Image (cartoon, helix red, strand yellow):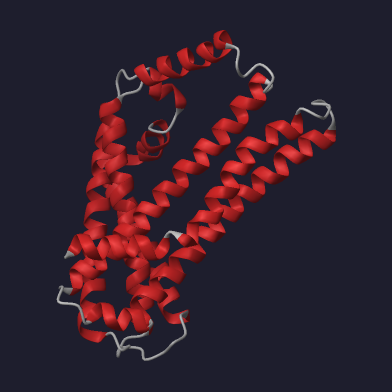
Amino acid sequence: MFGKLLKHDLKNSYRDYVYLYIAMMAYALLMPLILRFGDSQSLFIGFIIVLPTMILVIGGVIIMFRNVFSFIHRRLYSEAGYLTFSLPVPTWQILLSKVLTLMIWSMVTGLLTFVSMAIFFVSFRLEIAQILNIREVQMVIDVMVQALKNLNWGWVALSFVEYLFGLAALFTLIIGAMSLARSSLIKSRRYLVPALVFFGIILVWGMLSNVLMVTIFGPEVHYVSSSSMHPDFMIDITNTQSVWQYTAVSTVLSVVSFVLAFMASNWVLENKLEL
């Protein structure tokens, strides 16, 4: 039943993103062609490179968050939401389905944003006219393959787990905050109080996490956290025990934050929500 619920959520929400994805791919394919007809040294060409890129990134973020709130409202608090809670499934499965749906679309959006911008910059680099030159394409591929070989994949995998649970905690907390506005605890359709609660929790949790990190790693915690994202770390992986420890602790904190947010949100949905 959970699989059907997740499938229905994905089917209900894909239209929210399809036009954004079309715009991304159109940007990636058309912009290099436009640039071929201009002087690459002109300010105008620089302008039409920067402006669409900024619009794509900022617009994508805005549309993504708009889709998140629209999906949650549509699937939990409208008539469709009422029908959802009438299904013979526990509340935690309903909540988990919504969180997974939002995570899937978030990751797909991020991946397509990266792919579209990579296509654009690679095409611009090779000047489109030479894109079919096998030797130049092979050189680009060789550089990418070499970079992938030098990655510390164990650390990448651990960081990805941290990212997944952090993303899950974020969406779960958003659902919990929005549900709080419609609960018997507040009895308000305005989202000011839940928004304050949301940012308050984020602030307090961030402060507690920072205190814990400083307690474990000492004053050099900021160096450790910044070095874990330094480009040199991707190539030179010697003497990185502190970075591994920092990432491991961050992953545990992400898991704990997700579990706490999920339990609290599930309790609100199950016991206090008023549709």
Viewer can see residue 176: yes
Give how far across and how far down residue 180 sits, in percent. Answer: 34, 80
User: Is 114 on the left or on the right of 181, as rendered?
Assistant: right
User: Is 66 on the left or on the right of 205, as rendered?
Assistant: right
Give how far across and how far down residue 106 sits, in percent. Answer: 41, 52
Residue at horizontal 39 percent and vertical 23 percent from the top? 234
Compared with 107, 136 (above or below) is above
Compared with 184, 47 (above or below) is above
Give how far across and how far down residue 143 sits, in percent. Answer: 48, 15
Task: Give the quadrant of residue 247.
Answer: top left
Q: Which of 215 and 175 is in front in this view?
A: 175
| Position of the N terminus by quadrant | bottom left
Task: Give the quadrant of residue 69.
Answer: bottom left
Q: Nearer the viewer, residue 10 or 148?
A: 10
| Position of the C terminus by quadrant | bottom left
Residue at horizontal 56 percent and vertical 8 percent from the top? 135
Give how far across and how far down residue 258 sits, in percent. Answer: 25, 59
Residue at horizontal 62 percent and vertical 48 percent from the top? 56
Viewer can see residue 243: no
Residue at horizontal 60 percent and vertical 12 percent from the top? 133
User: Is 143 on the left or on the right of 254, as rendered?
Assistant: right
User: Is 161 on the left or on the right of 92, as rendered?
Assistant: right
Task: Give the quadrant of residue 43.
Answer: top right
